[in-house]
Amino acid sequence: MTEGEFDLIRRLFAPLAEKEPGAFGLEDDVAALLDTDFVATKDALVAGVHFPEDERFDLIARKALRVNLSDLAAKGAKPFGYLLGCVWPTDATSAEMEEFAAGLKQDQETYKITLLGGDTTRHRRAGAPLTLSVTMFGLGPRDGVVRRNGARVGDDVYVTGTIGDAGLGLMAAQGEETFPSSDEAELHERLRLPSPRLRFGGALPGVASAAIDVSDGLVADAGHLAAASGVAIEIDAARLPMSDAAIAWRARQSDPDASITALAGAGDDYEILFTAPPERRRAIDIASQVTKTSATKIGVARSGHGVRLLNESGAQISLLRPGYDHFR
Ligand code: ADP
Ligand code: MG
């Protein structure tokens, strides 16, 4: 089997971070800059990989900020500011760069964050794609960030919002699936412009035992949390929160297990998957009401390892592709 994204990170990069406890062994969504309140996270975005080459430049900018904000959200951190690296295509126009900057401005206002610095360069080779890298800083909660590694056997497993919409939006954009036009617009919007769950995430410290943002796919990210915590995660497919558009799509599919794995294996949800002991149920319901963000109990943490997805009759669904991996 080829070496996956996470094997590469473990083999090549984790040894370079092993002296610094705040790097968490490169096994979390953020690093804590110890002895300060700051946490840091970085996500790179490449045209043709993370957004279509003909995407609007303001939306590209806003997505670049929001995928990073999602990592802060899952840790209960408050966004502060960011460093921005841009490598523009040879033929980038100033109108495109202006539209990009306008997108940054809009989301800076929405999330009350500021640009801190960065670097701006240009590709030499014609056709090389717009390549972006955002390093986002946030202020961690007083009692420390909600790590990926705190889930315990017996904890309940929850996820915010709905799962699989961005994946369906991608299928629609690629012409693999057709949807009624209003559903298509909604699904496509989920893909183009995620909504990081910052308000809900802010309520998680002291309530959740572990958390991760769902960027690679529900099953893949549940797997990352399970591995970091040393537990198995069992998810009931019947409980997966789905949008009306996803429910309607699923009703049109012939294989209910395959359609669930498609939703649970698709990336770009930017929801928060978290665990909490059963007695935290009420605190979670209150957080959900106060922040107007749904949080659905989808399963439990058990002893063992890995992720099991159970279908409506309790049978285990085989998972061929748990989520997105850039190297597999
Ligand atoms: P996320 O999906 O939360 O953004 P990733 O899946 O991209 O996280 O990365 C997993 C972990 O590996 C994170 O702790 C991240 O900081 C670390 N990581 C990924 N690539 C590198 C790299 N090139 N150098 C150092 N750390 C990295
Ligand atoms: Mg993450």
Image: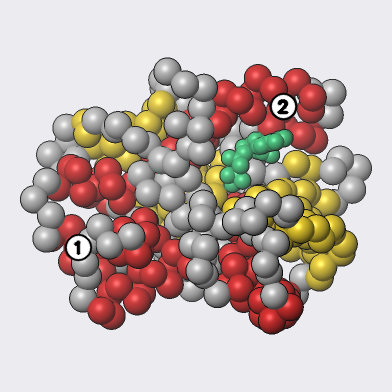
Q: In the orientation shown, which residue stands out farthest toward the left?
A: 254
Q: Residue at x 69, y 22 (%)?
A: 12
Q: Amino acid at mark 2?
A: Phe
Q: Answer with the quadrant where ligand 1 appears in the image.
A: top right
Looking at this view, is 217 or 138 the one in front? 217
Residue at label 1?
Answer: 249
Please tell me how crowded label 1 is: few (under 14), some (14-19), or many (20+) other residues with Cα within 10 Å: some
Q: Amino acid at mark 1?
A: Trp
Q: How many numbered marks appear?
A: 2
Q: Tell me, for residue 133, which label it has, or none.
A: none
Tell me if I can see residue 73 in this picture. Answer: no
First in sequence, mark 2 or 1: give its number.
2
Q: Secondary structure at mark 1?
A: helix
Do labels 2 and 1 touch, CB within 8 Å? no
Q: Secondary structure at mark 2?
A: helix
> CB at mark 2 closer than 8 A to ligand 1?
yes
